[in-house]
Image: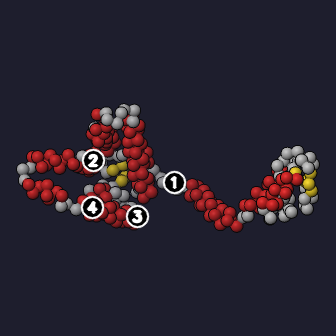
Amino acid sequence: FVPRVTQLDAIDLDTEYENTIEGNLRKCLAHFSPDHQLHNYLPEIQCLIRFYVWKGTLWNRFSSIGQSLLGIHYGRNTRIGPIIVGTIYTLGPYVIERRNIFWKLTNYFVKEPRASHIASKIPWRKIEAIINFSKLLNLVVFLYEGKYPSLLARIFKWRHYPDDEEAVREVSYEYMVREMLWNSFAELLTAVIPLVDISWLFRCWKRKERQRILDSNSCAECEEEIILPTKAECGHFFCHYCLSANTKKNLDYICPICSRKTT
C-alpha cells in the first residue's frame, strides 16, 4: 500500500525537477544573443533532455525522480506503460511547441485541400477543457480510492508499489502539529492586531525615547538647544518659535513628550 500523499508528493517532485532543468537551460541560453541559432532549437534541446531523463528513470528503474526519492515505483510487469508514458512525456510538449511546423508538413505531404480545412475545424479549446475536467475527476476518484494519481496511470492501469514491501509505515504528526500551532497563532494575530492602537504604542515609545535623550536645555520639539525658552501648559520647555509655529499650524497640537494638548 502506498499512501495518497506519497503518490501526490512524487508528482510534485517530478514537476519541480522539470522546472529546475528548464530554468537552468534558459539561464545557460541567456548568455547567448536573442538571435542566436540555439534559441531556435530550444524545443529540440528540451525534448532531448526529457528523453534522457525518461530513459534513466522510468525505462531503467520503473520509477521517476520523485518516486525514487520517496521509495516507490510503478509495476514492473510490462514495458508498455513506460514506453507510452515516455512517448507522451518526451514528444507531447515538443509536438505542441512545433505544431505549426507539423501542420505545414502535413499540408505538404498530404495533397488534399481539405486537410488544412479539417485541421482548422478541430475544437482544440474544447479538447483541452475536456482533458482538464478529466484530470479533475480523476483526482477526486484518486482521493477516494487511492490507486491512480494521474490520468495516464488510470488509462493504462499503472499502479504504485513500495520499494520495500516489508517496510513498516511510521506515521509522525510532529509536522502537522507545528503547522496547526502556527496557523492558530497566525489567526490569533490576524484577529488581535486590528484591535491594538498602534498610534498609542508609537507615542509611548516616542515619549520614552525623548525622555531618555532630552535634558532641561533641549527643546521638546526640535531636540536642540532652546532658543527663547517657552514653557507649555504641560510643563515642558520649547523654543518660542517651535511652540508658536506648531500651535498656529495645528490647534490640536500635542506635546511630543507627554502627548498632552498644548497651546
Q: Secondary structure at mark 4?
A: helix
Secondary element at tag 3: helix
For this view, does 185 lie left or right of residue 15? right
Q: CA distance from mark 1 to mark 3?
A: 21 Å
Residue beneath the point at 61% across and 58% down: 182
Say whether disc 4 or disc 1 marks the residue closer to the N-terminus.
Answer: 4
The label on residue 143 is 3
Q: Name which of mark 2 and mark 1 comes first in the sequence.
A: 2
State which mark lies toward you, 1 or 3: 3
Would you name the residue on which mark 4 appears?
Answer: 125
Disc 3 to disc 4, C-alpha distance: 27 Å
Q: Position of residue 60 (x, y in %)?
A: 31, 40
- What amino acid is found at the position of numbered circle 3 in the picture? Leu
Query: Where is residue 168 shown, x and y percent of the image?
Result: 48, 53
Q: Which mark is residue 116?
A: none
Q: Secondary structure at mark 2?
A: helix
Q: Residue at x 29, y 42 (%)?
A: 43
Which residue carries the number 1 mark?
Answer: 170
- In the picture, the quarter occupied by the N terminus is bottom left
Please tell me which residue lies in front, 135 or 243.
243
